[in-house]
Amino acid sequence: MNTPVSVGVIGCGGISAVHLNCLCRMEQVKVVAVCDIKRERAEAARDYCARERNWQVDVYEDYKELIARADIDVVHVLTPHYLHAPIALDAIRAGKYVLVEKPVARDTAQARELIAGAQGRLAVIFQNRYNGSVKALRELLASGELGGLKMVRANVLWHREAPYYTQSGWRGSMETEGGGTLINQSIHTLDLMLYTVGPAKRVKGTTSIDYLKGVIDVEESVHAVLEYANGARGLIHCSNSNAIDAPIELEYILEKGTLLLRGDRLYKLVGDECEVVFTPAKLNVGGKDYWGTGHLAQIKDYYAHIMSGEHFWLDGAQAYPALDLVKAIQLSSAEDRWVELADMPFETVVPGAN
């Protein structure tokens, strides 16, 4: 692929600030077009690129006009969830490489159609896999130093009020968002559970709307239990009705000790001793603090792969299991039963939370 790589950005909402910040730090790429149905947001993205890099960026309101351009090599899809798959698939069919924000799609039916048509050109953002703490965590788990896994516990406790949903035009609706805290805030943590300990055998979950009944029809809070083939269990507690945005926690209870990932810090606890294994360096890549800093590492790695002609590893198939787990928990709550992950139906557009 020739450099600089020409990039188009579709969707200029909040997360686009992070993507544009990362792209403007890179020497072998150039943003040439941005698109949003709200023209003022696309114009703001254009102006940012002009200030940071003096790039001349064209503005579109119809994404089909952007992907029709022969000079664009890569498209970032940063739209509401329900548009991820159809826009990404259109871009792939137009011959583009596509980097889509999580989730890969609103539901598993959309995701499977997209993955089937990806032609090796699809990649998905799960930036926390690039955190130094996660790399250290995986190394410790693989070493066997603390023995086998007995339990993994995830806490994602954040705070979202009604305007967060009502002012977006798409959040809070199963039809457009595909869920609530599970598919939006917590899917990163579910992905890390899968990335560090592998898939569960089955799941039993309950979802609820705590304070925003009549405002949203998606889960506001979730409790779920996972069972693994080796007998270990997983516990998931996620909520958007917490008093604050608390640091995300992943706790691994092992035979000889405990590993605790809190935010982007990793702790090892053995007996009465607590060791700080990893502390992150300060790095500002734009956006909100709780989005972390992994976007820059993942986006750089992505472009390094495609410029060298190599397949990028974090593709649709890698991203699918986290979405599958989200839908399994939603289905379990809706039908009040254990759901076997291997038996998940093709269509998993489930009812909204009770």
Image (cartoon, rainbow, N blue to C red):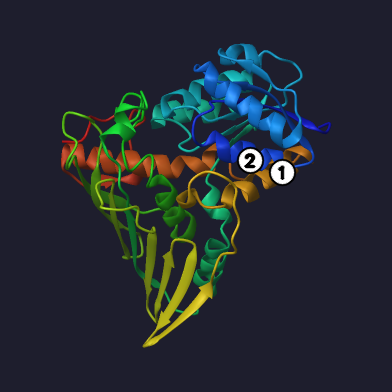
In the figure, is residue 269 to the left or right of 69? left
Q: Which mark is residue 21?
A: 2
Q: Quadrant of the N terminus?
A: top right
Where does the image place residue 282, in percent across and percent down from the top left?
A: 59, 61
Image point (45%, 74%), residue name: 267
Q: Quadrant of residue 35?
A: top right
Q: Residue at x 60, y 48 (%)?
A: 285
Work out whether 118 lies above or below 339: above
Q: Residue 139's x, y, as percent?
A: 56, 69
Work out whether residue 244 or residue 191 is closer to the camera in this orientation and state it: 244
What is the CA distance from the residue labelled 2 to the residue labelled 1?
7 Å
Q: Position of residue 264 (x, y in %)?
A: 49, 62
Q: Disc 2, disc 1: CB below 8 Å?
A: yes
Q: Is residue 151 left or right of residue 211?
A: right
Which residue is label 1 attached to?
Answer: 25
Query: Which corner quadrant of the image does residue 218 belong to?
Result: top left
Q: Find residue 76 and report its image quarter.
A: top right
Report the number of numbered marks: 2
The amino acid type of the residue labelled 1 equals: Arg
Question: What residue is shown at x 32% (from left), y 65% (from top)?
Answer: 232
Q: Is residue 324 visible?
A: yes
Other-residue count near label 2 (Cα within 10 Å), few / some / many at <14 / 14–19 / ≥20: some
Q: Residue 1, relative to residue 188: is it above or below? A: above
Q: Amino acid at mark 2?
A: Asn
Q: Is residue 191 above or below residue 17?
A: below
